[in-house]
Image (cartoon, grey):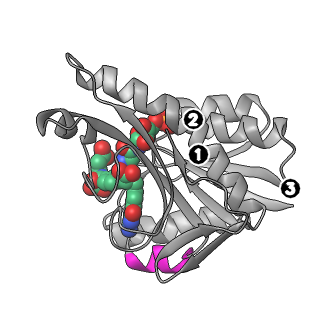
Amino acid sequence: MKRIVILISGRGSNMQAVAEACAREGWPATVAAVVSNRPQAAGLAWAAERGIATAVVDHTRFETRAAFDAALREAIDAFAPDLLVLAGFMRILGADFTRHYEGRMLNVHPSLLPAFTGLHTHRRAIEAGCKLAGATVHFVTAELDHGPIVAQAVVPVLPGDDEAALAGRVLRQEHRMYPMAVRWFVEGQLRVEGGVVHHVGGAAQLLV
Ligand code: NHR
Ligand code: GAR
């Protein structure tokens, strides 16, 4: 059984989607813990109610990013993860941290990378007049939102869309795509060659 640790900062709907798919589909994996940098993250209560271990490492209690990263790593490694899943986790991680989990840390980012790295992706896509938007699952590397791409999902940007409307449309696709991508990882179906991720069975890495 592969051990999954999920990092959240808030609502945790992607965490839920992954944890529910793992249980329902009988993956060779278990969600060992959910860890948040915010004590009030709603997703913590959801996990605790289901008997999933939780931990909080509150970034506001640390003087430096390096000290936070070190404490976070210690909390996570107590659960001996094979895979770290970032699900709406909102703190940029330093190179020591990302190196420690290189090749076993995934993130879902709400844009079609490499477009719109960073924050406020939906607003920026609307302001740029994009006709397509979407989300990307990628391996996490030191360079923010630049790791190898595992899967992408596309949605239309519709006339009259505001940030909330577009975010909701993208989020529904995240909830389909992220469990699929995490499952590929735990089943050992992913290969990274020259920065490009292939599914060994040739599964479609694009959701439309
Ligand atoms: N860290 C590294 N090194 N590489 C990545 O690819 C990362 C990462 C940490 C988080 C998620 C990411 C996203 O999907 C992620 C990918 C937070 C920020 C940010 O600016 C940017 C991107 C992502 C997450 N955070 C602010 C900070 O100063 C805080 C913002 C807040 O607390 O609301 O850390 O978009
Ligand atoms: C998701 O849309 C995710 O892609 C995005 O925040 C939302 C989290 O929702 N992530 C980021 O913006 C990371 N910077 P959730 O907490 O309900 O999964």
* Amino acid type shown at disc 1: Tyr
Residue depicted at 69% across the width and 62% down the height: 185
Kindly identify the residue that appears in the image at 57 percent across and 43 percent down. 177
Location of the N terminus (image quadrant): bottom right
| Residue 165 visible in the snapshot | yes
Drawn side of residue 22 relative to residue 64, left or right: right
Residue holding disc 1 = 178
Any magenta on residue 100? yes
Residue at x 77% of width, y 31% of height: 50
Q: Earlier in the sequence, mark 1 or mark 3?
A: 3
Q: Main secondary structure of the magenta part?
A: helix
Mark sitting on residue 28: 3
Amino acid type of disc 3? Answer: Pro
**Magenta-tinted stretch:** 95-102
Q: Are marks 2 and 1 in contact (CB under 8 Å)?
A: yes
Q: For residue 175, which numbered disc appears in the image?
A: 2
